[in-house]
Image (spheres, grey):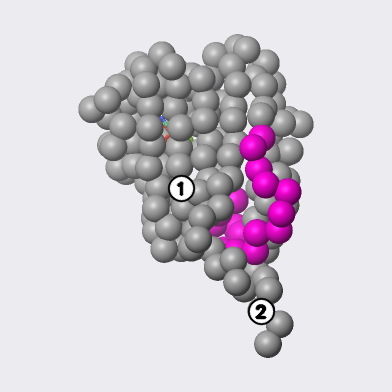
Amino acid sequence: DWINFTVFFNKIIDRFEMTKSQNVTFKRDIPAEDLYVDIDTDKITQVLDNIISNALKYSPEGGKLTFKVKVFREEILISIQDEGVGIPKDSVKKIFDRFYRVDKARTRKLGGTGLGLAIAKEMIEAHSGEIWAESKERRGTTIFFTLPYNPDQEDDWE
Ligand code: ATP
Ligand code: MG
């Protein structure tokens, strides 16, 4: 479906902001312009749901989540940053593997199967995008992903 990504993303963030039970601040750095992309909205909703629930799950009280969208020539870059526990250096790449969970003791009480990010990676790659993480232990984690974008599409009247 062709959708305006900024509207779509803001609605998903709104849903989390309205239902969150923790004291976590939401900050948005999302352009006001229309950004039309051709995506499977159910699948990208699932990707965002997992990334945002992870960010909340590993955030401390009083933490902040920052949502960004940056526009490039042929893609948009989406990022979700938290101020949570972070991920050890040697595990950052592995979080996208099926069933991989960083700390068995820590994650057991937080629940989950370890499949969320593996599915997210599959879905982003099916959209010809890329997904990766940057993290610093005790400082927080940022998940980045790209989606193809063609800025000329919108002005194409011919
Ligand atoms: P599921 O998503 O299936 O409910 P899950 O959240 O444990 O389970 P993933 O979403 O695939 O699984 O994440 C894999 C692991 O990566 C998590 O168990 C956690 O250890 C780590 N992780 C993911 N996101 C974060 C984050 N924002 N901060 C810290 N660790 C994270
Ligand atoms: Mg998850």
Given residues 89 and 73, the one toward you in this image is 73
> Magenta span covers which residues?
28-46
Vertical comparison of 14 with 24: above or below: below
Image quadrant of residue 15? top right
Please state if 140 lies on the left or on the right of 48 as rendered: left
* The furthest residue to the bottom: 158
Q: Is residue 2 magenta?
A: no
**Is residue 122 something one can see in this rendering?**
yes
* Residue 110 x/y as whole percent: 48, 22
Q: Is residue 39 magenta?
A: yes
Q: Is mark 2 within 8 Å of ligand 1?
A: no
Please state if 95 lies on the left or on the right of 27 as rendered: left
Residue drawn at point x = 44 percent, y = 27 percent: 141
Residue drawn at point x = 38 percent, y = 37 percent: 133
* Residue 36 x/y as whole percent: 65, 64
Given residues 48 and 103, the one toward you in this image is 48
* Residue 93 x/y as whole percent: 28, 37
Residue drawn at point x = 41 percent, y = 63 percent: 128
Image quadrant of residue 143? top left
Q: Quadrant of the C terminus?
A: bottom right
* Residue 137 x/y as whole percent: 36, 17
**Is residue 116 something one can see in this rendering?**
no
SS category of the residue bearing label 2: loop
Q: Give amino acid for label 1.
A: Phe
Q: Give amino acid for label 2.
A: Asp
Tell which circle, 2 or 1, labels the residue nearer the N-terminal end: 1
Mark 1 lies on residue: 145
Mark 2 lies on residue: 156
